[in-house]
Image (cartoon, rainbow, N blue to C red):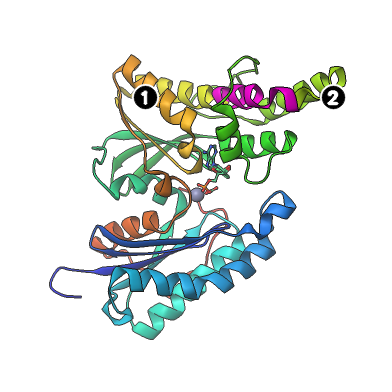
Amino acid sequence: MKGNECHILAIESSCDDTGASVFRNDQMLSNIVAGQSVHEAWGGVVPELASRAHHQHIVPVVDKAIKEAGIKKTDLSAIAFTRGPGLLGPLLVGTQFAKALSLSLNIPLIEVNHMQAHVMAHFIEEPKPEPPFLCLTASGGHTQIILVEGPLQTKLLGQTRDDAAGEAFDKSAKLLGLPYPGGPHIDQWGQKGKDCFKFPEPKIPGYDFSFSGLKTAIMYFIRDEQAKNPEFINENKADICASIQEQIVRILLNKVKKAAKDYNIKIIAIAGGVSANSCFRSRLEEYGNKYGWECFKPKNEFCTDNAAMIGITAYYKFLKEEFCDLSICPSARLKL
Ligand code: KG4
Ligand code: ZN
């Protein structure tokens, strides 16, 4: 570390993407991610296969991140890793790797909460939202409305009681015979279709969400229509996808609207894999114009799982010297 300059290596391995990123203070120098196509054949992430793929990817991904950053391993000031929430096997790979590097280089270790990091993705690049703001994080495993009062000050206002928004996308895609993960496929098909099929909006009080009823409604709708016309999916794929994504996005944004009104906050951010959805991004702008919100959407590479969001979170923790020791364990159900 030179003067006030720090270099942080961040590792993300909570699910099926192995990520490594290097930061110089709050400036991102590299951001590498290796996906895992091995799960496609199974229609979902297989935890054991994910752990093994992380083992194969982690050394080359970290190596590339350090090379691309133009630094040497010995320039590093700290190692950050995703502690949870996520799949325990994949988390263990990243955690153990980070611990080993921290021990061998004799530099501090920083644990990062994956859900906090999705929110912190908004602090990677300009323009950054000025706290206090609301962040809706929608990913494959979580759907949360968060009040952000400062870079590491996040307060959970509401979350899903069952399926996550990303799961609603992925499970609907499966019903339509689309590959895993289905969210991006529904997005692409939906762009060519119309919002002409109606699905129910759950009546959940407060800021909590529920997506399991929607999933069941979509399942029965497709079953009934296919009984009348076996070619129903093929003939209507674009319209079905458009209707599904419009309804998921409406459910998400109606809750944001309620929270924005109750908390009198007009700075709204979205995060997590589902925030890459083109319909979600354009509807957010429409709500923003209608209700006078200033809206923030991360670049696509910072929506889905990435190590840069771990790196920026770690930078703020580094400033506060929030380090952990080698006895730290990953936690699959780590809370925000
Ligand atoms: O944040 P993320 O990469 O991983 C988790 O932490 O879960 O989110 C993955 C989720 C998956 O459910 C995936 O289908 C969804 O984000 N997703 C999308 C899009 N891109 C990724 N959903 C809808 N439209 C997209 N373009
Ligand atoms: Zn995630």
Where does the magenta region start and end?
234-247
In the image, 233 versus 94, the foreground residue is 233
State whether residue 102 is above or below residue 277: below
Task: Please report contact status of discs 1 and 2: CB closer than 8 Å, yes or no.
Answer: no
- Amino acid, disc 1: Glu
- Residue 86: x and y in percent read 56, 55
Looking at the image, in which quadrant does ligand 1 appear?
A: top right
Tell me what residue is drawn at x 42 percent, y 26 percent: 282
Residue beneath disc 2: 230
Tell me what residue is drawn at x 30 percent, y 79 percent: 72
Residue beneath disc 1: 285
Label 1, residues with CA under 10 Å away: few <14, some 14-19, many ≥20? some
Secondary element under disc 1, as helix, strand or loop, is helix
Secondary element under disc 2, as helix, strand or loop, is loop
State whether residue 165 is above or below residue 300: above
Please, which residue is most extreme toward the bottom here?
104
